[in-house]
Image (tube, rainbow, N blue to C red):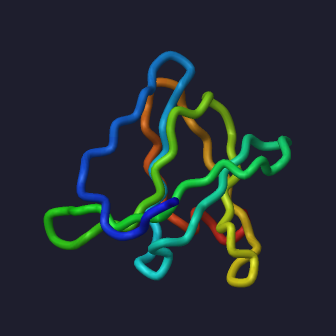
Amino acid sequence: METTGPSLGHVVLEIGGRQGGLVVHLPPEFEGDEIEIRRLCEPWAGRHVAVRARPAIERPVFAAVFGPLEEGQYELRRRDWRREARSHRVEVVGGEVVDTHWPMSDDA
């Protein structure tokens, strides 16, 4: 069973070599929603994570954290098609954590 609510612990990502991580910042209204990811040109296979509130200095940050991911281009979408059907693209870099914001562009 998945839990929602604030993430109180640290996030640990196993990255290095050709493996990278991805942090997607989202608006607070996405809390509890799931963000799905796939490599470009591959079918959606159901890999997803929940958007969680994460402690920060001034106010919580709402984010979905993915890792490890093989370096390359990926597509993200909100799993709830009733609210939003568009997707967004991002490039994961091996040995790094890519930090991006939703939506990344209006034309993605």
Q: Nearer the viewer, residue 21 or 8?
A: 8
Q: Measuring from the top left, give residue 51's x and y in whole percent.
A: 47, 64
Q: Measuring from the top left, give residue 2's x and y in whole percent.
A: 50, 60
Q: Measuring from the top left, give residue 43's x and y in whole percent.
A: 85, 46
66 versus 18 height, above or below: below
Q: How many marks?
A: 0
Q: Is residue 74 left or right of residue 67?
A: right
Viewport quadrant of the C terminus: bottom right
Which residue appears at 50% of the width and 31% of the height?
20
Q: Is residue 82 left or right of residue 8?
A: right
Q: Is residue 47 left or right of residue 59?
A: right
Which residue appears at 26% of the width and 46% of the height?
10
Q: Nearer the viewer, residue 1 or 24?
A: 1
Q: Residue furthest top?
A: 17
40 versus 84 height, above or below: above
87 versus 83 height, above or below: above
Which residue appears at 50% of the width and 16% of the height?
17
34 versus 40 height, above or below: below
Q: Residue furthest left?
A: 57
Q: Nearer the viewer, residue 101 or 7?
A: 7
Quadrant of residue 70 within the rendered picture:
top right
Which residue appears at 72% of the width and 52% of the height?
46
